[in-house]
């Protein structure tokens, strides 16, 4: 512990009248700890309420009060505590299988848009596989809450709704421009299509690797 006594202050470089040295306290039999603190500090605390505190707290209050009286404002180091890195909460295998199935449904919608007559954007947003996938997301959302699969559900749901938002803005632009906007709207719609493919592929690969998603 840290013992404080009156004496030479040059070893610490602090204010006159205080010297702090590391020493082990050898408490005499029958001697109260607060009396020992008074001997170390050389004074009693101004507040009588301090005597109702445990002996360890009394000593801390005495040290702080004595330092304040001397006007010492130097740094006082305290040991830093490092919290352990949080680990992802494991999930049941059945929930992992559900998440795999939702990714598969979204991927099937993208495949329909690539090889079929529909566009990728249209197949993903109004195709029955993706609609079923979104419904399953909300049905099973409570079951995965608190696990690492929650990030994948959030990733899937945001992929659908953000994609719908961007496509809606493009359609509104086309309507406002009386159809002329289609000449430039195909570019953002193509980017959204590639974004759908990226999000589903990225999330599915992370799931197979047992990793949560960052969004």
Image (tube, rainbow, N blue to C red):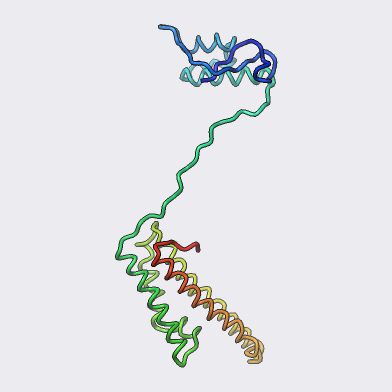
Residue 114 to residue 209: above or below: below
Residue pictured at 34% horizontal, 59% vertical? 91
Specify whether 18 is left or right of 203. Answer: right
Q: Quadrant of residue 13?
A: top right
**Residue 32 at what x, y percent from top left?**
45, 10
Residue 167 to residue 37: above or below: below
Residue pictured at 51% horizontal, 18% vertical? 58
Query: In front here: 115 or 66?
Result: 115
Q: Quadrant of residue 11?
A: top right
Residue 60 to residue 161: above or below: above
Query: In front here: 30 or 52?
Result: 30
Residue pictured at 50% horizontal, 83% vertical? 121
Residue pictured at 44% horizontal, 61% vertical? 212
**Residue 184 at what x, y percent from top left?**
65, 87
Q: How many marks?
A: 0
**Residue 39 at what x, y percent from top left?**
55, 8
Residue 179 to residue 164: above or below: below
Specify whether 147 is left or right of 198. Answer: left
**Residue 137 at what x, y percent from top left?**
39, 70
Query: In front here: 122 or 213?
Result: 213
């Amino acid at each position: 512990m840290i013992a404080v006594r009156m004496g030479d202050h040059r070893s610490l470089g602090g204010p006159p009248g205080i010297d702090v040295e590391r020493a082990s306290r050898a408490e005499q039999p029958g001697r109260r700890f607060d009396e020992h603190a008074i001997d170390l500090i050389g004074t009693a605390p101004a507040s009588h309420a301090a005597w109702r505190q445990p002996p360890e707290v009394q000593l801390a209050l005495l040290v702080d009060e004595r330092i304040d009286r001397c006007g010492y404002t130097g740094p006082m180091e305290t040991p830093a505590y490092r919290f352990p890195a949080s680990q992802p909460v494991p999930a049941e295998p059945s929930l992992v299988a559900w998440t795999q199935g939702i990714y598969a449904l979204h991927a099937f919608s993208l495949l329909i848009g690539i090889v079929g007559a529909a566009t990728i954007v249209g197949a993903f947003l109004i195709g029955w596989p993706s609609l079923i996938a979104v419904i399953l997301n909300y049905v099973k959302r409570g079951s995965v809450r608190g696990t690492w699969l929650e990030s994948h559900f959030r990733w899937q749901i945001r992929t659908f709704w953000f994609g719908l938002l961007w496509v809606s803005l493009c359609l509104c632009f086309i309507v406002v421009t009386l159809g002329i906007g289609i000449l430039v709207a195909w570019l953002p719609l193509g980017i959204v299509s590639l974004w759908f493919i990226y999000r589903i592929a990225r999330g599915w690969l992370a799931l197979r690797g047992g990793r949560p998603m960052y969004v």
